[in-house]
Image: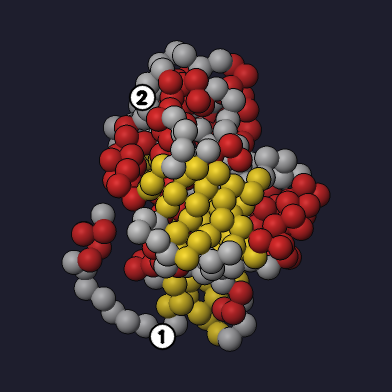
Amino acid sequence: MEGILAGLPEFPNGDLLVGPKTFDDAGVFKVNDDLALVQTLDFFTPIVDDPYDYGQIAAANALSDVYAMGGAPLTAMNILTFPTGDVDSTTIAEILRGGADKVHEAGAVIVGGHTLQDAEIKYGLSVTGSIKPDRIIKNSGVRPGDAMVLTKPLGGGLIIAALKAGEAEAGEVAKMVEAMKTLNKAASEAMIELGVNACTDITGFGFLGHAYEMAITSKVTLSFSAGSIPFMQGSLRHAKMGLMPGASVLNKGHLSDKVRVEGDVTEDFLEVLFDSQTSGGLLIALPADRSDALLGKLEEKGVRDAAVVGEALEALDVPMIVKP
């Protein structure tokens, strides 16, 4: 994808504050000195059986990019494809209801959308949010000495793969769905109140993929403590079974030479770090002496699984290190 984007023409605009060249989660366009628009979109095929849950997860995933930038969602537009005649209207209605309920929970409104006939169902949102131009939180602001805080556990891709293979336990799936339906709104509000240096949300490129983007754009090395990273129930077990989804395999192939493993960290553990996530948590960088305060704010707002998972170092020979 980087190679494809590199060949596209550029049309510089002074009001484009964040564009496609910086690996940030959303684009930001300045309207005036007090207002900028945060814009993003995301959609994907069903990953769970229940259509209402699927709609909620897809909406939470799309909204997350705005939260990662420190913005507030304003409006959303539905993106929906489905095979006409092969899917009953109740299923489609439940997907849209799930998305609408999650957008309403975010304090935004659905203003329309577009449907298209396709061989399979795909659903998501195009989202517009607001932010002050001087309050944008990018992924490129990490500083040496920062603590790295993760707000949701990892492993959703592995549990989805296990579900499709008939290997996932009901409790594992329920906890995964609950995590993916949860908006990053509270986590975003906490980091805005406290003040942080950088943020990204953990989605398709996995934990290490998004951490890599933070490291290279910030010109630092990120060192992670394996024992501090929260995992979803069952994810490590499914990694040991070899149930690594295709997107996670691609992540591993792209990133393996960009991370150095020091000490006794198992291959199964690393596979969870490469695992492609849907509607994952925020990865936040802030001064280490403020990390406890952030964890306290997150706890107050109901974000229960947040943890300090590593630190930022001066740039070394690799962008990422994983230690026991």
Q: CA distance from mark 1 to mark 2?
A: 47 Å
89 vs 314: above or below: above
Write the residue at 46% across / 38% down.
263
Please state the horizontal and vertical placement of residue 124, each as a whole percent of the image. Answer: 46, 45
Left/right placement of residue 306 relative to residue 25 reads: right
Write the residue at 60% across / 71% down.
131
Q: Which residue was labeled with disc 2? A: 86
Q: Which label belongs to residue 14? A: 1
Task: Inspect this view and state whether residue 128 appears.
Answer: no
162 vs 283: above or below: above
Which of the image's four quarters has the N terminus? bottom left
Residue 3, by quadrant, is: bottom left
54 vs 289: above or below: above
Q: Inspect the image, locate mark 2, and give the three-letter code of the amino acid beneath it.
A: Asp
Q: Inspect the image, locate mark 1, and give the three-letter code of the amino acid beneath it.
A: Gly
Left/right placement of residue 317 relative to residue 162 reads: left
Question: Quick one: SS at disc 2?
Answer: loop
Q: Mark 1 Cα within 10 Å, few/some/many (few <14, many 20+)?
A: few
Write the residue at 74% across / 55% down.
292
